[in-house]
Image (cartoon, grey):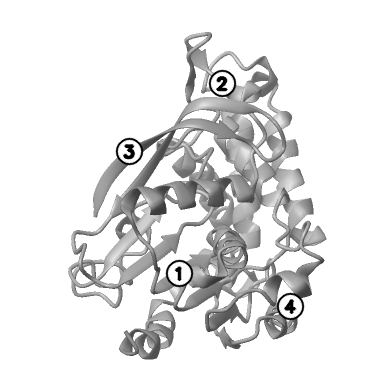
Amino acid sequence: MIKHYLNIESFDFESGGHLDNVRIVYHTSGNREGKVIWICHALTANSDPEDWWPQIVGEGKILDTSRYFIICVNILCSAYGSCGPATINPATGKPFLLTYPKTTVRDIVKTLEVVRKHLGIKYIDLLVGSSVGGFQAIEWAVSEPELFGHVIFSATAPVISPWLAAQTETQRMAIEADPTFREAASLQGGAAGLRCARAQALITYRCYEGYKLTQSEPDPDFLFASRPASYQQHQGDKLISRGFDAYSYYYICNEMDSHNAGRGRGGLRAALGRIQAPATVISIDTDTIFPPHEATEWSKFIPKARHISITSNFGHDGFLLETEQFTEILKPILCKF
């Protein structure tokens, strides 16, 4: 997919604050004449879905980049190019860090609309969003109901739960416990806290069975369990090596906390009732962040929705790993194009 940059000259944030020259990074596939598929990415992913969903997106894959016009926009506050705490403040010549305006899911969706209009897209045949990408997709489908032909909401919900909000706060606490974070001297601040936050998050992304399958000790006579510890350390280091900084992660956690599709719309039932497109709601049987019983309830509020629960040994991350099941769900949807 091809990487692009777009500059928004003036941007007002939902919770207050204003910036000029807000840069947005996005990717598109090459087939501009194909049906339009828009993918909203998850928490720490980037705007190139071929990078983090390679079994699903790419030439010859179910979401074929040679057949469809596929778009994915990097979210505000990401470390992968779009404007956020890592952006240089022109007034100081240094990164904004903790002076960046507090950002919401609706701010992100506002940038999606800017990119859509810039590209001249009047109709999106398929909208796909998983996890935090699902937050964006739900918000967008509610705010622009006539825009979409079909929507897929995977491993997500229309409002952040107390359970997930507690997790995001715990991760922020880990970052704040690193004294270098509040010093805010450079983007390297809070790195140790970020490693801890990421390790904490990973436990919620996976599940008991997944750790048992992949992180059990090879020696049945072990004295101390070391393999899971090594894995957690590796995952913390991996996010740092990918170029993520603590400030971007901290702000994205705040974005998650803002998610409430019913805010100012008469509640969730009324908001979800605005979605006009047929909706496929996908849950994962071992997902402790967005359990299937929750999806069963809220999907009833969408007029043309069906709920499918897939099986996985890997919890919430099943939306990335159970690609065969996801492909089978996509096939009949794409056949209608």
> Quick check: 10 left or right of 135?
left
**Residue that badge 1 annotates:** 127
Task: List the residue tagged with mark 4.
Answer: 294
Q: Is residue 165 above or below residue 215?
A: above
**Nearer the observer, disc 1 or disc 2?**
1
Q: Nearer the viewer, mark 3 or mark 4?
A: 3
User: Residue tagged by mark 2?
Assistant: 96
> In the structure shown, which secondary structural element does the residue marked by tag 1 occupy?
strand
* Residue type marked 3: Tyr
Give whichever of discs 1 and 2 has the lower sequence position: 2
| Up/down of 203 relative to 241, above or below | below
| Label 4: which secondary element | helix
- Seen in the image, is 329 located left or right of residue 4? right
Name the residue beneath numbered marker 3.
5
Q: Is there a contact, CB below 8 Å, between mark 3 and mark 2?
A: no
Disc on the earlier residue, 4 or 1 = 1
Mark 3 residue element: strand
Instruction: Using the numbered discs, state the Cα–Cα distance from disc 3 to disc 4 in whole angstroms.
Output: 37 Å
Frontmost residue, 186 versus 331: 331
Report whether residue 232 is seen: yes
Query: Which residue type carries mark 4?
Result: Glu
Labels 3 & 4 near each other (Cβ < 8 A): no
Front residue (pair 219, 210): 210
Mark before the other along the chain sequence, 3 or 4: 3
